[in-house]
Image: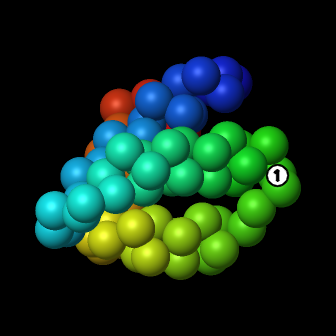
């Protein structure tokens, strides 16, 4: 079974779709949202909506996560 830390690493590779003046705040918000997702406090749909609101290209993000999870054989 994959540990939470491995899942966190697989999910946390993202790049903003465009530069944001609040990039650090967006990163912190996304990190906290990921923790809530992994703890079962947030649905995947809501998590992806949060990422989109932080200017994350959700389609690219999902491809990266899928590749990372494939490497972990999840």
**Of 25 and 34, which appears nearest the observer?**
25
> Above or below — where is 15 with respect to 31?
below
Left or right of residue 40: residue 2: left
> Above or below — where is 40 with respect to 44?
above
> Above or below — where is 3 with respect to 45?
above
Left or right of residue 27: residue 47: right
Q: Taking the image as drawn, is residue 41 in sight? A: yes
Q: How is the image coloured?
A: rainbow
Q: How crowded is mark 1: few (under 14 residues within 10 Å), some or many (20 or more)?
A: few
Q: Which residue appears at 62% of the width and 76% of the height?
A: 45
What is the tally of numbered marks visible in this picture?
1
Q: What element carries label 1?
A: loop
Percent position of residue 29, x then y: 54, 52
Left or right of residue 31: residue 36: right
Percent position of residue 4, x then y: 66, 27
**In the image, farthest residue toward the left:** 18
Q: Which residue appears at 59% of the width and 22% of the height?
A: 5
Quarter placement of the N terminus: top right
**In the image, farthest residue toward the front:** 21
> Above or below — where is 1 with respect to 23?
above
**Of 72 and 42, which appears nearest the observer?**
42
**Residue 10 in which image quadrant:** top left
Q: Taking the image as drawn, is residue 34 in sight? A: no
Quarter placement of the C terminus: top right
The residue where tag 1 is placed is 40
Percent position of residue 27, x then y: 42, 47
Percent position of residue 34, x then y: 60, 48
Left or right of residue 29: residue 23: left
Q: Which residue appears at 40% of the width and 68% of the height?
A: 54
């Amino acid at each position: 079974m994959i540990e939470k830390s491995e899942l966190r690493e697989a999910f946390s590779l993202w790049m903003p779709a465009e530069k944001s003046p609040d990039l650090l705040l967006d990163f912190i918000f996304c990190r906290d949202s990921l923790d809530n997702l992994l703890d079962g406090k947030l649905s995947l749909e809501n998590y992806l909506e949060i990422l989109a609101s932080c200017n994350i290209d959700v389609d690219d993000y999902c491809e990266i996560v899928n590749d990372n999870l494939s490497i972990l054989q999840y």
